[in-house]
Amino acid sequence: MFTGIVEELGIVRALRLLPKSGQLTLEGKKVLNGTQIGDSIAINGVCLTVIRQSEREFTVDVMAETLTKTNLAELKSGSRVNLERALQLQTRLGGHLVSGHVDGIGSIRRITAWGIAQVYEITAPSALLSYVLPKGSIAIDGISLTVIDVETDYFTVSLIPHTFEETTLGLKGVGASVNLETDLIGKYVARFMGLNTIGKEKQDLSLGFLAEHGFV
């Protein structure tokens, strides 16, 4: 579990991609402090397991499912990536609960300046947008951001100068792809209410339903 508060920008040092798997070696400093083999690190919002590490680098395996559902296959040697270690119980929850399990890929549609901020329009699949709501939280490339508005095929977020300068979003332009993870709690609520559930009838949320599933 993560918070979506990026700790540092890492650098891809080696990339080995096969048709159904891959392996990444990345340079990082802060995220390797206290990290052991088997620990999880979010790379552009994707939760991956450390399989090897040295003083300044670590290596992770990437499964076929991850290559299909994220934009990690677009990385190249020298690419900058957002890095965050897994949440510890004593850590301040500065963002929101992020699992590192990406829901889909979006695309930067437009970037406009608004005072000190940069407003990003992000296109996304309609099935994913159904979990996005104004003033709710979303993780974009692992960055916890607050949604401004939601339209039929895109949503908007605003970046303060710190986020623009300290994460990969400041390096990306119009047309670039981004990993999207919608709010974890919202997905569970929608699931229990029967929303966006393929092949099942929608269930009304009632006291009896909540009791049946152990909520009351």
Image (cartoon, grey):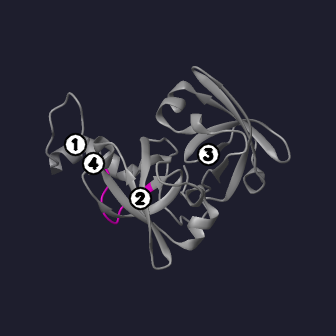
Residue named by callout 4: 130
| Mark 3: few/some/many CA within 10 Å (<14, 14-19, 20+) | many
In whole angstroms, how far apart are the C-alphas of marks 2 and 4?
21 Å
Magenta span covers which residues? 131-138
In whole angstroms, how far apart are the C-alphas of marks 2 and 3?
24 Å
Of marks 1 and 3, which one's residue comes earlier in the chain?
A: 3
In whole angstroms, how far apart are the C-alphas of marks 3 and 4?
25 Å
The location of residue 55, given as percent across then percent down, is: 86, 47
Tell me the tag on residue 110.
2
Mark 1 falls on what kind of element? loop
One can see residue 158 in this view: yes
Residue named by callout 3: 43
Viewer-nearest of labels 1 and 2? Answer: 2
Mark 4 falls on what kind of element? loop
The location of residue 209, given as percent across then percent down, is: 19, 44
| Mark 2: few/some/many CA within 10 Å (<14, 14-19, 20+) | some
The residue at the far bottom in this view is 115
